[in-house]
Image (cartoon, rainbow, N blue to C red):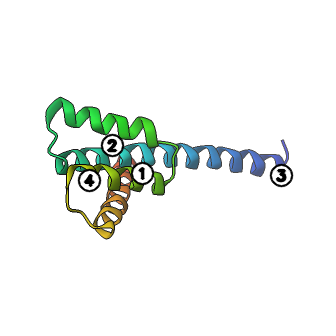
Amino acid sequence: MNGFERREEDFEKKFAHDEDMRFRAHARRNKLVGLWAAAKLGLAGAAAQAYADEVVATFVNASTDALFNKLRKDFDDKGVVQSDHQISRTVEELMARAVEEIKAGR
């Protein structure tokens, strides 16, 4: 294997690793967001877990905007007062937390 092939293989491995990390971070973020939203919606125990699991399953490959829209609709439907800024900020904060947890091996 020459230097070019080795660099290409290394690049492909890094790309695959980065994509795996991105997928895991989004899934973890969605779980954390789902649990946060469930608490705001007054859900607890199995109902909160089911809501969080639904968020993970539905939005793991979806855009952040799609996730935001679901949260906005669910909060509005239940009369939960959360500004768009609060929702967006929480989603961002929980993404940062998810990345930290994954990097720490948790």
Residue underneath mark 3 = 4
Q: Give the x, y percent position of residue 34.
A: 30, 45
Alpha carbons under labels 1 and 4: distance apart: 12 Å
The N terminus appears in which quarter of the rendering?
top right
Coordinates of residue 44 in the picture (x, y in percent): 14, 38
Label 1's element? helix
Rounded to the nearest whole Å, what is the CA distance between mark 1 and mark 2?
A: 12 Å
**First in sequence: mark 1 vs mark 4:** 1
- Determine the secondary structure under disc 4: helix
Between label 1 and label 4, give the one nearer the viewer.
Answer: 4
Three-letter code for the amino acid on which mark 4 is drawn: Phe
Q: Which residue is found at the position 70% from the left and 46% from the top?
A: 12
The circle on residue 31 is 2
Q: Is residue 31 left or right of residue 6?
A: left
Which amino acid does the dot numbered 3 rest on?
A: Phe
Kindly identify the residue that appears in the image at 17 percent across and 47 percent down. Answer: 39
Q: Depth-wise, is mark 2 or mark 4 nearer the camera?
A: 4
Q: Which residue corresponds to mark 1?
A: 67
Give the vertical position of 1 relative to 40 (above or below).
Answer: above
Q: Are marks 1 and 4 in contact (CB under 8 Å)?
A: no
The secondary structure type at the circle numbered 3 is helix
Q: Between marks 3 and 4, how big is the CA–CA gap?
A: 53 Å
Looking at the image, tell me whether mark 1 or mark 2 is earlier in sequence order.
2
Q: Is the C terminus in the top left, top right, bottom left or bottom right quadrant?
A: top left
Does residue 105 show up?
no
Question: Which amino acid, mark 2?
Answer: Lys
Q: Is residue 15 left or right of residue 1?
A: left
Residue pointed to by mark 4: 75
Between 30 and 99, the residue placed more toward the observer is 30
